[in-house]
Image (tube, rainbow, N blue to C red):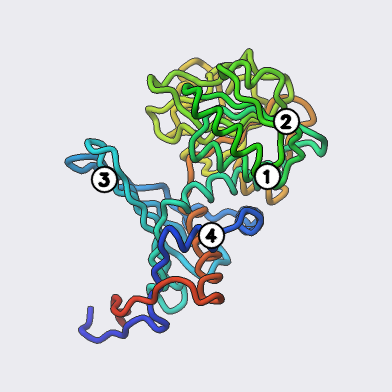
Amino acid sequence: MTDSGVAAEAATLFLTDADVAALADWDAAIAALRDAYARPEDPKATPERAVAVTATGWQRVMPSAPPGARFAGSKTIAASMTDGVASYLVTLFDQHDSRLAALIDGNRITGIRTAATAAAALTALLPDRPLTAAVVGSGFEARAQLRAASRIARIEGVRVSSPTAAHRARFARELGTELGIPITAVTDARTAVDGADLVLCAARSHDETPTVLADWVTRDATIVSVGSTTPSQRELDPALIDRAGFIVADALAEVLHDSGDMIAAREAGFDPDAVTVSLHDLLGGAARRPEQGIAIYKSTGSGFQDIVLAELLYDRAVAQGAGTPLPVGILTIRK
């Protein structure tokens, strides 16, 4: 270590949640993530997340240096479970000169990249015909999933379910108007899922029992599951995992070994490993969905997605003069 160093030039750029909302759009996000996942995978470039347990909750760090990208960085999540609050911060470091290029509020990035990555996967999973969709959940993630999916799929009708009648009615009314798609609010997940070609799962039950059961799902349906990302969480019925002939994971090792759905399926005597491929293999052409059978896209999220989207947002901010250049910054040290 040395005392000599230089400040970032150009200055580190700070992007607020409002900046992210103004700079992001679904088509660009989906395209960027599809292109990034089509490149060969390098497991060393995106290690598994690290979690530090705090007195009130946890801190999670998700690093990545996507191959071919200009930036490397990480998303840090600080959560206080006692107060029910969390903060998200994405850092971007230039891979060539190591300067801290940006600090970005990661709250909105998380929802956008999760849905945009699922949509990228769906470009290689869905048939090219009009589809009926089911949405299980009516919150932020559910809304993002339908918005993104509608950009790449020919959705002709939607059924949405969630525990609160007012929430599902508002979802149907607002998203139906926004997307120009007929959306019907229904009282339970089974009614929503029955006969649907595409099932978007974005809600866990409070007691961590599955929200979608195997015998509700039609034979050749496509399922997106983003609501269970830790070992203790459940979203899909273990028997549904067993029925699937093809499972795609955004982060292969974490989905198979750290996702509650896969852990429960394995404990029930099923073998998800035998039918699970990485999203890199799907979008890179090394794997292809079988002509028949249920397909599942299972996501635990990844720092890879955060950094790919953050780079897109940073480049747009620089081009548009958006964001706030910081008057101070960290030093880059020559070693």
Q: Nearer the viewer, mark 3 or mark 4?
A: 4
Q: Nearer the viewer, mark 4 or mark 2?
A: 2
Q: Is residue 170 in view?
A: yes
Q: Earlier in the sequence, mark 1 or mark 2?
A: 2
Q: Is residue 27 above or below residue 249?
A: below
Residue under pointer 4: 308
Q: Earlier in the sequence, mark 4 or mark 2?
A: 2
> At 42% across and 73% down in the image, what residue appears?
101
Q: Earlier in the sequence, mark 4 or mark 1?
A: 1
Residue under pointer 3: 52
Q: Is residue 310 above or below residue 151?
A: below
Residue under pointer 2: 157
- Mark 1 secondary-structure assignment: helix
- Cα gap from disc 1 to disc 3, whole angstroms: 33 Å
Say which amino acid is labelled 3: Ala
- Cα gap from disc 3 to disc 4, whole angstroms: 24 Å
Residue under pointer 1: 282
- Cα gap from disc 1 to disc 2, whole angstroms: 27 Å
> At 70% across and 24% down in the image, what residue appears?
196
Cβ atoms under marks 1 and 3 closer than 8 Å:
no
**Quarter of the image containing the C terminus?**
bottom left
Name the residue furthest top: 215
